[in-house]
Image (cartoon, rainbow, N blue to C red):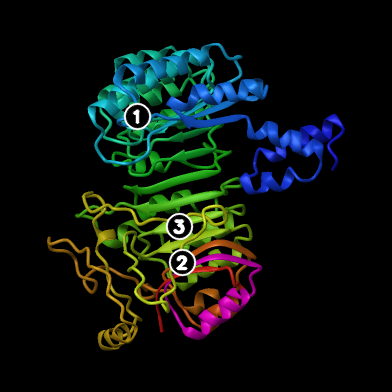
Amino acid sequence: MDGYSPAAAAIIERVVSFLGKKELGICKTLNKTWLTLVTIQSARNIDCHIIQLPLQIAYYRRKRLLTTVRSLTIDLGYVDGYLSVPAYERRIGDATALLKGLPATIRHLKLHIPETRSVLSNSEIHFGSMALCKLLGALPRLTTLDLGDCPIALLDSAAGSQLSAIRGLKKVRWFSLGRNDLSSAATLCQLVSANHQTLTALYGRSDVTDRTLQVLCAAPKLQCLDASGSSISDDALLRLVQTCGSTLHDLVLSDCTRLTKRSISHLLPEALPRLASLDLYNVMVTTDTYHGLFNARTRWPYLRDLKLKAAIPHTSPRHDSLVNDDILESIGQNCPRLVSLRLFGCHGITDNGLSSILGNLGYLRELVVMHSASEPIPATTRSSTVSAAIPAETSPSLPTPVENSNNSNDFWADTPALPRNALSQQQTSQAQRSLNLVSPPSTAPSSPVVSEDDAPRSENSQRIFTSHALHRGVRSRRFNLLNLDMEYDSVCAEHLAKLSHLHVLCGRMITRHAKSLIESQFPKCKMMVWNID
């Protein structure tokens, strides 16, 4: 494609917006048209510190690229000792004054502060709040506002009034660093109320309240909602699903401790026909609720991302809140386009359930099935224990263990237990001494718990997967991430060797023969396995 026609130029401009710096550098060498379009695309975003913003604007003006700028990524971190206090304030004022004189083409604003320390000083809070307030006042026609990497301490009364004055926002990512309070939740509610007619995505997290959901019920274009860690109630969620369910694509309800089966059981395909992503991590539901969401009568034609983990209270028996094999079989049959499936704390899944997932889902790229959500992976002590860092530009991010030790609703996930078909204690200690490995530290609480033998368990339940889970084969040919509580032996390696792509493989144990088979078939595969037998 030479790019000389207007249609070709439009296609190229659309394609290069998804490329990284390395790919853009290669595209510049094709021809002059590609060089021009890639240069314009690279100039659409200004990424710099607030103090360096005037120099960047002067450079863009000299290159005649100011009309191409569409987004700003500004670092609000305070540089101690660089300028005096009056000079620092004057530099921030000059930067925002230059923004007011630019063409009204900037639509996206992302603000962040490097995580250098956990507590901000008074100077950092003062200059960060000042820069936030002035930037919001200089860019009144924003459509995307990203404050997710800023601490909540920057939100003062002046910044709150500027936020309430913005109109026409489509995407809002709220503060996620620091401890939010009632004032930040009220400011978010005012911001949503002022932009509810145009709002399509809200990532409010813990600051989403029932009042905010009530305002969102009048949002006709709402597609994405992230209310993770919030205290929303069942009634508020039910009203939102009834009014905006037909347009919702992404719904994140992780760690919403007040939600129960009364509202979760209504998250059905009839109410959410276009849902593509559902996150119910650490939500207080039972097996019956999961059966209501995933059964032979509920078909999710567009669901691509699913994350489940039930929060089990102290008074609930373990088997009351599990994802079992029947639910996995329903997911495999009724979610044909599922790309990412992440299941944590699933003590009721056996080889049969895992086999139904691997044998039915042809588009699956990421699969994580962990019996315990917070089992730590020991640090690498020898080269034989395979643990490699993944390059950010080519590899997906690994799921990090979620720390829930302070959450009373997540009790059983922090109680590790050995698999029933694992090696004996003597054999395990010998293997660890031969490999010079250190056992992962126990995270069991000091309070009395129900033992493994006393807990209700089915006859086929197990705590580690075997090669029988692959007896149906693997329908999906490409896996970016495969993280299972599995002992990978030669039979497992032979099944996995039939894949066309395997990027990251995680598990409990792998034999040396299986390791050599996978390395010969996938030389670039990154393996993070506890130990090698």
Q: Is residue 98 above or below residue 401?
A: above
Which residue is painted at 46% across and 61% down in the image?
368
Q: Nearer the viewer, mark 1 or mark 2?
A: 1
Tell me the element at label 2.
Answer: loop
Q: Mark 3: which amino acid?
A: Leu
- Residue bearing the label numbered 2: 388
Which residue is painted at 30% across and 51% down in the image?
311
Left or right of 419 on screen, residue 103: right
> How far is disc 1 from disc 3 in space, using C-alphas?
38 Å
From the top left corner, tell me how far across and down residue 257 is, in percent.
Answer: 29, 42
Tell me the element at label 1.
Answer: loop
From the top left corner, tell me how far across and down residue 307 is, in percent.
Answer: 45, 51
**Mark 2 neighbour density, 10 Å: few (under 14) some (14–19) many (20 or more):** some
Towards the viewer: 98 or 457: 98
**Mark 1 neighbour density, 10 Å: few (under 14) some (14–19) many (20 or more):** few
Taking the magenta stretch, the answer to whether it contains residue 515 is yes
- Can residue 144 be seen here? The reply is yes
Taking the magenta stretch, the answer to whether it contains residue 1 is no
Quadrant into which the N terminus falls = top right
Q: Mark 1: which amino acid?
A: Tyr
Tell me which label, 1 or 2, sits earlier in the chain.
1
- Residue bearing the label numbered 1: 82
Quadrant into which the C terminus falls = bottom left
- Which region is colored magenta? 496-521
Which residue is painted at 60% across and 78% down in the image?
520
- Residue bearing the label numbered 3: 398
Tell me the element at label 3.
Answer: loop
Q: Nearer the viewer, mark 2 or mark 3?
A: 2
Q: Mark 2: which amino acid?
A: Ala
